Amino acid sequence: MPFTDEFIPGDKKGTEFLGDIEIAVCKSCGSAQNMNNTDMSEYYFEYTYSVQSSNFAIGFMQTLAKRIKETCFNNSLHPKILEIGSGSGEQLLEFKKLGFEVLGIEPSEKLSQYAESIGVKTLTDFFDATTFRNAENGYDKVDAIVTSYTFDHIPQISETLENIYNVLNTNGILIIEVHDLDKIRDRNEYCLFEHEHYTYLNQATMTQLLNKKQFEVITFDLLSDQEKRGNSLLVVARKGTGLKMNAANPEEEVLKLTHLRVEIEEAIQRIDEWLYENRDQKIAAYGAGGRGIMTIAALKRPELIRYIVDKNPKAPDIFAPKSHLPVHKIDELGKNPVDKILVFSYGYYDEIVNEISSKYGYKHDQFISILTLLRKVND
C-alpha cells in the first residue's frame, strides 16, 4: 500500500513508496498497533491535507470550540490552548474567536504558513519534549491541548502523553479525536489502516491509556454522532494524579478483530464486483483523502474508475499513488461528465451531493457512498 498523500506527476509513476501494512493486537493492553514503524518525518514536512473548504468540517470545528468553551472554560478569561498537528489553523481560529489565546504545532511548512496568514500563531515543528525551548514566552504552560486526527499518527504516544501532562496547567483539559477502531471494524474501513497510523483505539483502550498516564476521562459524548466527523472517537479528559487505572479486556479486543481480515477481503471484493458490473458506465471517485486513495489502492481493477476529483487537490496534473488514477478539481465533473460518482468522503456525503448536483446537474441517484459497498448487505 502507498502513503495516502504521496501524489505523483505523470513522469514519476511507479516511483512512489509501496509497502505492506501489518496490524497486530497487543495481548497485554488490547490496543491495535501498526507493526511497521515507518519513518514519516520528511513526509509530514510536505503534507498538505486540509478540510478547510468543507462547510460541514468548519461547522464541526465551530461546535467543538463552542462546546469546550461552555463545558470547561465558561468562567475563564482568555484561556490558553495549544493544538498538536494544527494543520491550516482553522480549528484554532474558532477557539480564537471565542477569546482563547492559541498556538499551533504543525510540521508542514505550507500548512503553517497558511495558518499564520489567517492569524493563528504556529510553530513549524513536531510536538515533543524540546518543543518549547525556543517557543515564545507564555506557552510553557497552557490550559488546554487539542489534537484532531493526529494522535494516531504519533509513533510514541505514551511519551507524547507525558509531554502533554507536563505542559498542561493543573486540571488542564486534553481533547483528542482519532478514528474509532470499533467503527472501523463495523464498517470494514480497511482504508484507515495506513502507514501514517501507528495506533488504533476505541473507548476501552483509550480510557486505559489515558488513566495510565494520569488523565481522567470526562466524556466521550461532548458532541453527538450527527455533529461528529466520519468515524470520530472524541474524548475530553482532565489532567489528574493518582488515578485508578481502567483496564481494557485484551482477550475481548483480540476477539473483535479475529475475523477482520476475511471481512476486509470480502469488502474489497464487493467494490471490485460493483465496478465490474458497472463497467459499461463512466465512473468517477470523489475524495482524494486517505479513504479514497487507500480504498482504491487495494482494488484489482482501479482503472474502471475514470478519475478522482477533490475540492483541494495537492497540485495540478497529479496521479494517485499505486492506482495512478488522475486527480482533478471538481469542475472535471462538468467538463468530463460521468454516469456515477462513488463518494469516499462519506462524512460529507449530503454536502457533496448537493454541491455537485447544483453546479453540474447530476441527479441524486447517480451518487453512491462507499459505505454501501464496504458493509455487508445485511448490516
Image (tube, helix red, strand yellow):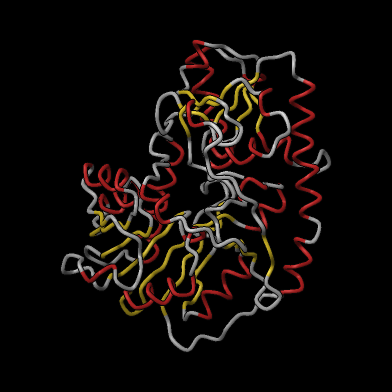
Place of residue 189 in the rendered image (x, y in percent of width and height, measured from the top left): 67, 46
Count of numbered labels shown in the rendering: 0
Q: Is residue 61 above or below residue 162?
A: above
Extreme-left residue of the structure: 137
Q: Please indicate whether residue 274 sits to the left or right of residue 227 in the image.
A: right
Extreme-bottom residue of the structure: 242
Q: Please indicate whether residue 32 sits to the left or right of residue 110 in the image.
A: right
Place of residue 103 in the rendered image (x, y in percent of width and height, measured from the top left): 26, 58
Residue for point 28% across, 48% down: 112
Place of residue 288 in the rendered image (x, y in percent of width and height, measured from the top left): 52, 34
- In which image quadrant can residue 338 be found? top right
Q: Is residue 190 above or below residue 360?
A: below
Q: Is residue 46 above or below residue 271?
A: below
Place of residue 49 in the rendered image (x, y in percent of width and height, measured from the top left): 42, 42
Q: Please indicate whether residue 256 sits to the left or right of residue 341 in the image.
A: right
Extreme-right residue of the structure: 378
Looking at the rendered image, the quarter that the C terminus falls into is: top right
Residue for point 36% across, 50% down: 45
Q: Is residue 246 above or below residue 130?
A: below
In terms of depth relative to the viewer, which is nearer, 177 or 350? 177
Looking at the rendered image, the quarter that the N terminus falls into is: top right
Residue for point 18% across, 69% down: 138
Residue for point 41% across, 53% down: 64
